[in-house]
Image (cartoon, rainbow, N blue to C red):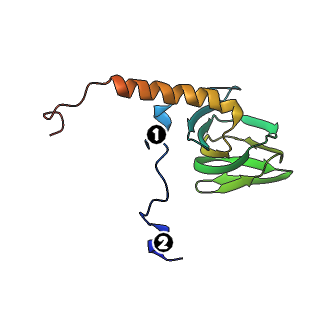
Amino acid sequence: MSGSEHFSLEAAGEPTSAGRFAGPNDVAPVQFIHGLEFRPVIGERMLANYVHFDRNSTAPRHVHEEEQIVIVLDGEFDFEIDGEVRTMRHGDMAVIPAWVPHSAHTKETTCLEVDVFNPPRKTLVDHAVAQRDAAQAAAAQAPPASAAENL
């Protein structure tokens, strides 16, 4: 495959919705357990979730039906996949298929990572949808920028 094939502008369909930008500070946090803060961003068929671990925090061993990819952005933590433990740092990734047991634990450092789920993780969808809808409603109610503000 060539670069022109990979970056083609030939549309084989119509966009299904508008694109948008989102960062960790654009999403209100939700905590299921102390020391872990989740900020989910939902797409149409996937979900990305910023996760901040405080020092000495644990995501307990668990399983779920969604496939998950973990990407460490900052800090480090010990990550366990089906009994194998590795210390993960900036840029490290882990792939967790459906129903594979996994957990994570920070020691004396914090960790910021992104989880990508397909399909969207059911326990995060309601929070993510509420955040998305609130942001869209606020954008729709915002007055248009005047020409002077754009200079």
The residue at 49%/69% (across/down) is 6
Q: Residue 49 at what x, y percent from top left?
A: 60, 39
Question: Tag 2: residue type?
Answer: Glu
Is 56 in front, or is 73? 73
Q: Which residue is mark 1?
A: 22
Is 73 in front, or is 98? 98
The residue at 57%/38% (across/down) is 42
- 21 displayed left or right of 54: left
- 117 displayed left or right of 90: right
In the rendered image, the vertical position of residue 80 relative to residue 136, given as above or below: below
In the rendered image, the vertical position of residue 100 relative to residue 52, given as above or below: below
Q: Residue 56 at what x, y percent from top left?
A: 70, 35
Q: In which quadrant will I find the N terminus?
A: bottom right
Question: Tag 1: residue type?
Answer: Ala
Q: In which quadrant will I find the C terminus?
A: top left
The residue at 13%/34% (across/down) is 148
Neighbour tally class for label 1: few under 14, some 14-19, many 20 plus, Cα within 10 Å: few
Q: Which mark is residue 14?
A: none
Q: Which residue is mark 2?
A: 5
Q: Secondary structure at mark 2?
A: helix
Label located before the other in sequence (2 or 1): 2
Q: Residue 111 at what x, y percent from top left?
A: 61, 42
Q: Which quarter of the picture shows residue 125?
A: top right
Q: Residue 72 at what x, y percent from top left?
A: 61, 50
Which circle, 2 or 1, is nearer the viewer? 2
